[in-house]
Image (cartoon, grey):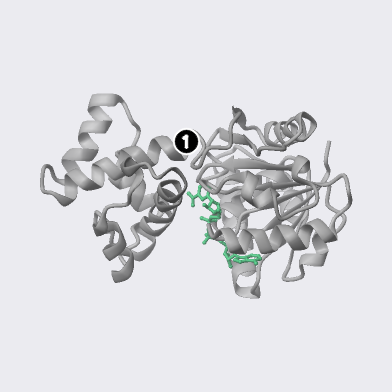
Amino acid sequence: MAKKLAVVGAGLMGAGIAQVSAQAGYEVVLRDVTDEALARGRSGIAASYEKFVAKGKMTAEDAEAALARITTTTDLDAAADADLVVEAVFERIEVKQEIFRTLDRLVGDDTVLASNTSAIPITKIAAVTERPERVVGTHFFSPVPLMQLCELVRGYKTSDETLARAREFAESTGKTCVVVNRDVAGFVTTRLISALVVEAVKLYESGVASAEDIDTACKLGFGHAMGPLATTDLTGVDILLHATGNIYTESQDEKFAPPEIMRRMVDAGDLGRKSGQGFYTY
Ligand SMILES: NC(=O)c1ccc[n+]([C@@H]2O[C@H](COP(=O)([O-])OP(=O)(O)OC[C@H]3O[C@@H](n4cnc5c(N)ncnc54)[C@H](O)[C@@H]3O)[C@@H](O)[C@H]2O)c1
C-alpha cells in the first residue's frame, strides 16, 4: 500500500482528502500556495477530528496521531518521495496542467498522479506528463470525511495497475468506488448533477417554480437527500458554473450550457453558502 501521500491544494477537498488519508495511516504532505490556506486547511481538519472524537467515532489518541501524520508546506518539492499524489486545486485546466507538468519531473517513475477534478478530462491533464498511464481521476465528494463515494476515472491511457492502485488507496480511506471507463467530460456524477442543476436553474430563472418548490419536488418526488439548488449553494455556484461550462465546452451538448443567471450570480458574488447568498439566503 502506498504509505506516503502528497495532497496538492488545502481547500475544502484537499483538506478532506488529507484528513481521511491520515486517519487511514498515510503520512501526508499537504501543499498549498500560501501559509494562510494551509493554516485554514489544518485547523479545519483538527476541528473535524474533534467532532468525531466528541461523537465517540474516534479516540482522542487516534485523532492526535492522525493530525501528527499531516505536514503542511508551500514547497511542491515536498511531494518528491510520495507514492501517490492527489491534486485538488482550483478547477482550472491550466493550473492543473502546470502542477502535473512539475510533479511529473519531481516524483519517482512509479508514482501515481491523481486528480480530484469534477469535470476536466483526465486525458487532458495526463497528456502534459510523460506518464499518462500512471495518471488517474480520484473524484472524492464533499464533505470528504462523510461522503462514501469515490469516482475513479480512467484517462485514455490509464493502466489497469494505476486504476487498481487508486482503488486500493480510496478503499483504504473507507470509500466505495465506481469506475468511469471512458473519460467523458464530467464523468458520470458531474454529468448527472450538471444536467439536473442546469434544468433546475432554468425552471427557477424562467419563473416556472420557486427554488424551494424545485428542491422539494426532487426531495419528495425522487427521494433525493437534497434538492439541486440547495446542492448548488452548498457546492458553490461558481464551482458548478465551471463544471457545467467545462462539460458544455467539451461535449457541445446544449443541455449543459450554463444558464445566464449563474454567471450573473457569480459576477455579483452570490456563490451560495460560502458567501451567505445563493439561491437561498444563509
Ligand atoms: N467542492 C466540492 O464539492 C468538490 C467536490 C468534488 C471535487 N471537487 C474538485 O476538487 C478540486 C478542489 O476543489 P475545492 O472545492 O477544494 O476548491 P477550494 O477553492 O476550496 O481549494 C482549492 C485550493 O487550491 C489551492 N491552490 C491553487 N493553486 C494551487 C497550486 N498551484 N498549488 C497548491 N495549491 C493551489 C488554493 O489556494 C485553494 O486552497 C477542484 O478540482 C474541484 O472541481 C470539488
In this picture, residue 73 sits left or right of residue 272: right
Q: Residue 90 appears in which quarter of the rendering?
A: bottom right
**x%, y% of residue 139?**
58, 41
Q: Could you tell me if residue 43 is visible in this image?
A: no
Q: Which residue lies furthest to the front in this view?
A: 252
Q: Which residue is drawn at the image coordinates 65% and 32% (left, top)?
A: 174
Q: Which amino acid does label 1 sit on?
A: Thr
x and y percent of residue 96 in the render? 63, 59
Rendered residue at 17%/51% (across/down): 205
- Residue 188 seen by the camera: yes
**Ligand 1 near label 1 (Cβ, under 8 Å)?**
no
Q: Please tell me which residue is depicted at 14% across the width and 45% down the height of the picture.
A: 210
Q: Residue at x 35, y 65 (%)?
A: 275
Q: In which quarter of the image is the N terminus?
A: top right
Considering every residue shown, the one lying at the far top of the view is: 222
Image quadrant holding the C terminus, namely: bottom left
Q: Tell me which image quadrant ligand 1 sits in.
A: bottom right
User: In the figure, residue 150 lies in which quadrant?
Assistant: top right
Q: Where in the figure is residue 223, as x and y percent of width and height?
A: 31, 26
- Say what secondary structure mark 1 lies in: helix
Nearest to the observer: residue 104 or residue 149: 104
Query: How far across and how far down the image is residue 250, in percent?
Result: 47, 47
For residue 78, above or below residue 114: below
Side of 245 relative to 208 (left or right): right
Q: Mark 1 points at which residue?
A: 189
85 relative to 203 in the view: left or right: right
Label 1 Cα neighbours within 10 Å, binned few <14 / some 14-19 / many ≥20: some
**Which residue in the rendered view is the most extreme toward the bottom?**
35
Q: How many discs appear?
A: 1
